[in-house]
Image: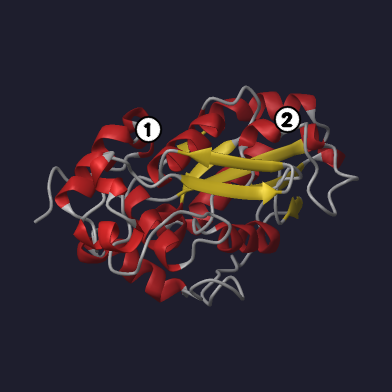
Amino acid sequence: YNISHPVILGLDTCEAYRKNVSNDKRLTAVAGLFNTGTNALEFHLRKNLQVKSKWQVPWGKHRVPYVRLQHVAPGMQNVEQRDVLPIVIFRDPLNWLQSMCRSPYAAKWKHTKLHCPNFVPNEHDTSKFGPELKESNNTFPVTVPFDKNQVISWDSLVHLYSDWYRQYLDADYPRVIVRFEDMLIHAEYIVQKIADCAGTQISTPFDYQVNSAKSHGSHTDFAKAIFKSADQETRLRNLTPEDLQYVRQHIDHDLLQQMHYKLPDELR
């Protein structure tokens, strides 16, 4: 991930944020897909920024970004959404896929422990879900019921990842985009950049999140997160050559390039 040079996008929108939102109204809030480290990021902002920080953006931290100004998350009715500086966290897509297999949260798609991440049906899938998968050359569509009024489907987990983050990357409002992997090693540096963007300071000494940041999911602590992110074998677990080729064909490569993520050409 070349973590010696943290990737931070959106700093060019900070001046507009400071100009349009007065000091007393500024606040940061977290956004990111499931399994991307949103809880740890929220801890670092809440504990270290000398400005108010919400645990999620007021339209919902996991919600598709286009619902901003259209949807209000529970408990966020009194928050002016335009006052919020979203801090969006990315994660390497292959490690994200592995985490989704362990803890899918609201995402629903056909998969088993023996083949997940899964994009191209193999013999195990056809025996489990029916031969029509192979015959029709289908993949495994994913559906996320954010609530009873908003149920969204994508062709695959890769399409969900690409579409969701592309919306934040192309947003026409101020936002700061950081990487999960950089937060593991350069948390203080990144939070300082966020503080500069919001026109505030960070606390000293810096308070690091070292234990599990959430009471649900995989309970991964700081050390385990580093080892998981650095383990190439874990990153590619259960992927077939056909799955990897599907990912390479359908993921948003411009997105990966801007975030400095690289996919292997083949399984080794």
Most foreground residue, 112 or 105? 112
Residue 23 visible, this orientation: yes
Per the image, the residue denoted by label 2 is 18
Query: How was the colour assigned to the protein in this rendering?
Result: secondary structure
Residue 192 on image: x %, y %: 57, 49
Is 35 positioned to the left or the right of 55 in the image? left
- Amino acid beneath label 1: Gln
Indicate the secondary structure of the residue bearing disc 2: helix
Mark 1 residue crowding within 10 angstroms, few (<14) / some (14–19) / many (20+):
few
Mark 2 or mark 1, earlier in chain: 2
Q: Residue shown at 64%/58% (left/top)?
A: 42
Q: Are marks 2 and 1 in contact (CB under 8 Å)?
A: no
Is 247 positioned to the left or the right of 93 in the image? left
Kindly give the residue lying farthest to the right in the view shown.
78
Where on the picture, by quarter, is residue 106?
Answer: bottom right
Residue 95 on image: x %, y %: 35, 57
Which label was assigned to residue 258?
1
Residue 134 on image: x %, y %: 24, 46
Is 186 positioned to the left or the right of 71 in the image? left
Q: Nearer the viewer, mark 2 or mark 1?
A: 1
Q: How many marks?
A: 2
Is 201 positioned to the left or the right of 177 in the image? right
Residue 137 on image: x %, y %: 26, 39
Mark 2 residue crowding within 10 angstroms, few (<14) / some (14–19) / many (20+):
some
- Amino acid beneath label 2: Arg
